[in-house]
């Protein structure tokens, strides 16, 4: 599933094709993804000029000079492909620009979504209203995290996956950041010391920044249908490495929390 770094890389990859460009045609090839495409999507986007692209949590946002904002989510298997040509079986939406670019939203499993909001999407799009701060923003710091986790008895891992605490973190990057910060994913959130929280915040930012940097170097692949659909970073510290050796020499264990795999090292993560 694409996570925050993959969405950020997608937005950066789309920007040179779309920013400042007029959309001459917008075509859907089926009525829906996870939910229906907005009925007036083509009408409202056709003829508009894209003013900017941005990201909130795991959503990409394409904004136009009509103050319309197309908000896309890549679901499990979505990606944009930019090399043009004709629509394939799994291409469900086409944006054509005046410069001649043809951008297809490609999503074999169709768990993605496309919505359209007129006006400030951060205030108007329901999925954005209750989101916590962006993990890479200055608002996300140890003091914020201490306030947000005070009194919370749920495991720290579950709290970091809670989008109202911090937006856009997924399973892999949370496992990795907890290992960097030497915090057990099983520890009740309120019991994580202030010193550990002070280590956790930069750990989260660092794993995301490293993944975005790795994504930039494989951008061409990510934006093509033949590219690797997996994650950018392959050398995980703990994720997917049950029985492997942690940096500290400890043995990595796999547990299941809320139905999802957690990987951690009991020796150094306390
Ligand atoms: Zn360890």
Image (cartoon, rainbow, N blue to C red):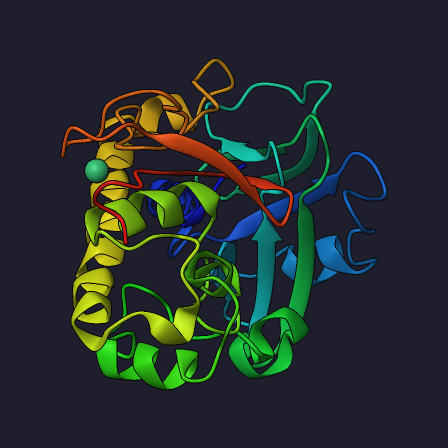
In front here: 124 or 183? 183
Vertical arrangement, residue 169 with respect to residue 142, above or below: above
Q: Residue at x 23, y 23 (%)?
A: 245
Tell me which corner region of the image, top left, top right, bottom left or bottom right, holds residue 125. Answer: bottom right
Please, which residue is most extreme toward the front here?
267
Q: Is residue 205 visible?
A: yes
Please, which residue is most extreme toward the top here?
226
Rendered location of residue 176, percent (x, y): 31, 43
In front here: 217 or 27? 217
In front here: 61 or 234? 234
Q: Residue at x 41, y 78 (%)?
A: 149
Q: Residue at x 57, y 78 (%)?
A: 130
Q: Is residue 8 visible?
A: no
Quadrant of the image where one finds ligand 1: top left
Rendered location of residue 270, percent (x, y): 28, 54
* Quarter occupied by the N terminus: top right
Rendered location of residue 246, percent (x, y): 22, 30
Q: Residue at x 38, y 57 (%)?
A: 20
């Amino acid at each position: 599933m694409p996570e925050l770094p993959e969405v950020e890389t997608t937005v950066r990859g789309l920007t040179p094709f779309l920013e400042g460009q007029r959309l001459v045609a917008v075509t859907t090839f089926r009525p829906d993804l996870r939910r229906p495409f907005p009925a007036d999507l083509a009408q409202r986007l056709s003829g508009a000029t894209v003013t900017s692209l941005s990201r909130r949590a795991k959503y990409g946002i394409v904004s136009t000079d009509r103050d319309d904002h197309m908000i896309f989510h890549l679901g499990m298997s979505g990606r944009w492909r930019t090399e043009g040509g004709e629509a394939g079986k799994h291409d469900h939406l086409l944006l054509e620009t005046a410069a001649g670019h043809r951008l297809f939203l490609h999503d074999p499993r169709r768990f993605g979504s496309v919505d359209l909001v007129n006006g400030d999407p951060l205030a108007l799009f329901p999925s954005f209203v209750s989101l916590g701060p962006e993990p890479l923003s200055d608002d996300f710091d140890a003091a914020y995290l201490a306030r947000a986790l005070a009194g919370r008895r749920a495991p720290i891992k579950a709290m970091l996956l809670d989008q109202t605490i911090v937006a856009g973190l997924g399973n892999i990057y949370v496992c990795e950041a907890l290992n960097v910060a030497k915090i057990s994913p099983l520890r009740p959130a309120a019991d994580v010391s202030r010193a550990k929280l002070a280590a956790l915040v930069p750990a989260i930012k660092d794993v995301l920044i490293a993944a975005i940097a790795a994504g930039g170097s494989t951008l061409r692949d990510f934006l093509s249908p033949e590219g690797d659909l997996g994650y950018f970073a392959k050398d995980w510290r703990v994720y997917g490495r049950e029985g492997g050796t942690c940096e500290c020499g400890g043995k990595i264990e796999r547990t299941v929390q809320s139905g999802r795999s957690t990987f951690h090292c009991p020796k150094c993560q306390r």
